[in-house]
């Protein structure tokens, strides 16, 4: 049996919004493998609020051990990946 995990890992990527099919302004996208969920935000503050809401919704009224192999109330580890020239583009 697999050991029950105590951490949700959230990976954040920055997009400058200038690609062909993009929104025209910078934004962040967060993805979480453990609960197979994504969210976004135009600022880090907005993104962190959206991450919290996303995780709350996914774990609400759920047997986290049976559904996601996670302890109840797991830790959340957020990793933010920024381009090398982020300070110039932000």
Image (cartoon, grey):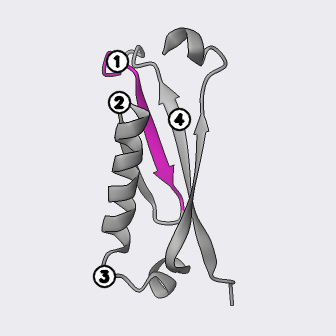
Look at 51% across and 11% down and name the residue there.
Answer: 89
Return the mark for residue 13. Answer: 4
Quickly name the residue at label 3.
Answer: 61
Check if mark 1's residue and mark 2's residue have beta carbons within 8 Å: yes
Q: Earlier in the sequence, mark 1 or mark 4?
A: 4
In three-dimensional space, the C-alpha distance between marks 4 and 2, rounded to whole angstroms, equals 12 Å
Q: Earlier in the sequence, mark 3 or mark 1?
A: 1
* 52 sits to left or right of 5: left
Q: Which quadrant does the N terminus fall into?
A: bottom right
Check if mark 3's residue and mark 1's residue have beta carbons within 8 Å: no
Look at 39% across and 19% down and name the residue there.
Answer: 17
Q: Earlier in the sequence, mark 1 or mark 2?
A: 1
Magenta stretch in the rendered image: 21-33
Check if mark 4's residue and mark 3's residue have beta carbons within 8 Å: no
* 5 sits to left or right of 66: right
Quickly name the residue at label 1.
Answer: 25
In three-dimensional space, the C-alpha distance between marks 1 and 4, rounded to whole angstroms, equals 14 Å
Quickly name the residue at label 2.
Answer: 42
Indicate whether 86 appears above or below 77.
Answer: above
Q: Position of residue 24 (x, y in %)?
A: 32, 15
Q: Position of residue 36 (x, y in %)?
A: 45, 61
Q: Earlier in the sequence, mark 4 or mark 3?
A: 4
Look at 34% across and 21% down and name the residue there.
Answer: 21
Q: Position of residue 8 (x, y in %)?
A: 55, 64
In-front residue for pair 77/38: 77
In three-dimensional space, the C-alpha distance between marks 1 and 2, rounded to whole angstroms, equals 8 Å
* Badge 4 element: strand
* Badge 3 element: loop
Look at 62% across and 14% down and name the residue there.
Answer: 85
Q: Nearer the viewer, mark 1 or mark 2?
A: 2
In-front residue for pair 15/73: 73
């Amino acid at each position: 049996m697999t050991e029950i995990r105590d951490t949700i890992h959230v990976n954040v990527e920055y997009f400058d919004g200038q690609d062909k099919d993009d929104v025209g302004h910078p934004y962040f996208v967060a993805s979480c493998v453990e609960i197979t969920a994504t969210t976004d935000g135009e600022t880090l503050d907005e993104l962190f609020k959206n991450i919290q809401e996303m995780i709350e919704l996914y774990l609400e009224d759920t047997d986290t051990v049976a559904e996601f192999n996670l302890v109840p109330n797991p830790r959340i580890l957020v990793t933010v990946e920024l381009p090398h020239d982020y300070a110039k583009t932000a």
